[in-house]
Image (spheres, helix red, strand yellow):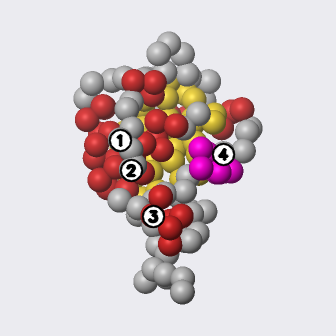
Amino acid sequence: VKMRPQSDVQEHCCVGLSILMGLFTPLKYGCDSIEVYHAFYKPLEFTVAERDASQCYIKVVCERDGDQRILGLHFTGPNAGEVTQGFAMGFHHPHSPDRDVGFHPTCAEEITKVNFSKRSGLDATVTGCLG
């Protein structure tokens, strides 16, 4: 017996700067001044229930230079609102991604593991338990 969810619609939540806002505000940032990290992930609860995790996605928009201060966060997946709310506090106290701490086992910890830059062209697809 496979458990099937009522709906496969994922929550999406974002806070801070979007990629478009970063690209089209050249006086402050522009395409050469931002770095976008992204990753697909598979939540623990999807593994047990054998659910499709192809829509679970994280994107972190950072300054490219210096300490890579986080400018924006986009999260699609279970409990997106709760996950994003926890990271929203960081926008009042600017910090870089390497200062984030993930709580285990939660979907929020996936944000601390995002290390594929879109600029690198590497595939951000989950390949196993450790991403």
Image disc number at residue 47: none
Q: Determine if residue 113 is in view.
A: yes
* In the rendered image, the vertical position of residue 117 relative to residue 44, given as above or below: above
Q: Secondary structure at mark 1?
A: loop
Vertical side of 78 occupied by 110: above or below: above
Image quarter where the N terminus lies is bottom right
Tell me the element at label 2. loop
Measured Cα–Cα span from mark 1 to mark 2? 6 Å
Give the x, y percent position of residue 90. 30, 31
Question: Front-most of 63 and 102?
Answer: 102
Q: Is residue 74 magenta?
A: no
Q: Alpha carbon of mark 3 to alpha carbon of mark 2: how far?
A: 10 Å
Earlier-in-chain disc, 3 versus 4 = 3
- In the foreground, 49 or 81: 49
> At 63% from the left edge and 36% from the top edge, which residue is drawn?
116
Q: Which residue is mark 4?
A: 124
Q: Which residue is mark 1?
A: 103
Give the spatial CA distance, label 3 vs label 1.
15 Å
Question: Which residue is drawn at the image coordinates 33% and 23% (left, top)?
Answer: 94
Quadrant assignment, res 109 = top left
Q: Which mark is residue 106?
A: 2
Tell which circle, 3 or 1, labels the residue nearer the N-terminal end.
3
- Which amino acid type corresponds to the residue marked 2 in the rendered image? Thr
Find residue 92 and report its image quarter. Answer: top left
Give the prevailing secondary structure in the magenta stretch. Answer: loop
Task: Residue type at mark 3: give it.
Answer: Glu
Question: Which residues are the magenta region?
Answer: 125-131
Q: Earlier in the sequence, mark 3 or mark 2?
A: 3
Q: Which residue in the structure is indicated by mark 3?
A: 45
